[in-house]
Image (cartoon, rainbow, N blue to C red):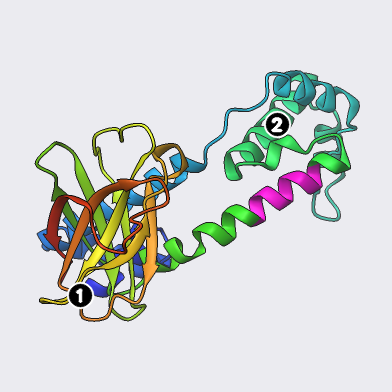
Amino acid sequence: MHTLAGAFALDAVNDVERAEFARHLEQCESCAQEVAELRATAARLGAAMAEEPPPEFKDRVLAAMHATRQLPPRTRPGSPERSRRSARAPRWAVVVAAAAAVVGLAAGGVFGGIALTQQQELRTAQTQLDQAKERYAPVAALLAAPDAKTAHGQAPAGGGVTVVLSKTLNRVMVMDAGLPAQPGGKVYEAWLITGTDAPRSAGVLAPPADGGLVVADGVGSADHLAVSLEQAGGSPSGTPTEVLMSMPVPA
């Protein structure tokens, strides 16, 4: 049951697995903690991709509703009375149903509601959505990995990082969890450390507005992770310049 933590956190289980794992959580404190951490991570990733709708969005939705012919609901053959009742549905019910459908589309995708009128907007929105999917596909695979483990590390200067690691995928994600704002022109860089070997860069953390994370493959047998403060673009020497914190990787 322990291997279902990642899939359960992302609601990627069937009804039977969901019920069984929910009962398991009542007795397994470590799984409950892991699910909570994975859900928090997924929520932060979703928030990083959220966008404010354009100011004219409401007017465009209302205009589309009034200009679009509403069709009656489908009924089973041989039920003329139901069809007649459906045809007499009050105007407000049709408007509410249409509005609910539009809201559902907007909530279901970051860019879905943008492309209501123009084909060019649709192509642009689809391109942006494809880019977002491509960018976060490694993160989604990591969070859903059966052996995904999470850990939190605190920095002496405040804040810290959340680390998600999968040995089977040989992949790690490091996410900013309240690190102090970087001085002008500075960035945070994550490092993988194996025993007494020289640290290996896992990459520069993206700005908080862009997710505040970095994903890297090639974890190998690394046993510690460090975060340093570097100039823009990362350490020029390939070694940490100003180490802010170090922590064991999730076992």
Question: Magenta region's main secondary structure?
Answer: helix
The reply to whether residue 1 is in sight is no
- The answer to which of 100 and 77 lies nearer the viewer is 100
Label 2 sits on residue: 97
Answer whether residue 170 is magenta in the image.
no
Identify whether 173 is placed above or below 126.
below
Residue at image location 67% in from the left, 48% down from the top = 128
Q: Nearer the viewer, mark 1 or mark 2?
A: 1
Residue at image location 31% in from the left, 61% down from the top = 237
Secondary structure at badge 1 equals: loop
The reply to whether residue 228 is in sight is yes
Instruction: Give the percent coordinates (x, y) of residue 187.
Output: 35, 44
What's the mark number on residue 222?
Answer: 1
- The answer to which of 179 and 232 lies nearer the viewer is 232
Identify the image quadrant of residue 107.
Answer: top right
Give the residues in magenta.
122-130
Identify whether 214 is placed above or below 67.
below
Query: In the rendered picture of this protein, how many numbered marks are placed on residues?
Result: 2
Answer whether residue 124 is magenta in the image.
yes
Q: Amino acid at mark 1?
A: Ala
- The answer to which of 80 and 214 lies nearer the viewer is 214
> Does residue 72 appear left or right of residue 8 in this picture?
right
Identify the image quadrant of residue 93.
Answer: top right
> Does residue 9 appear left or right of residue 2 in this picture?
right
Instruction: Give the percent coordinates (x, y) of residue 7.
Output: 37, 66
Label located before the other in sequence (1 or 2): 2
Residue at image location 19% in from the left, 45% down from the top = 160
- The answer to which of 177 and 18 lies nearer the viewer is 177
Q: Amino acid at mark 2?
A: Ala
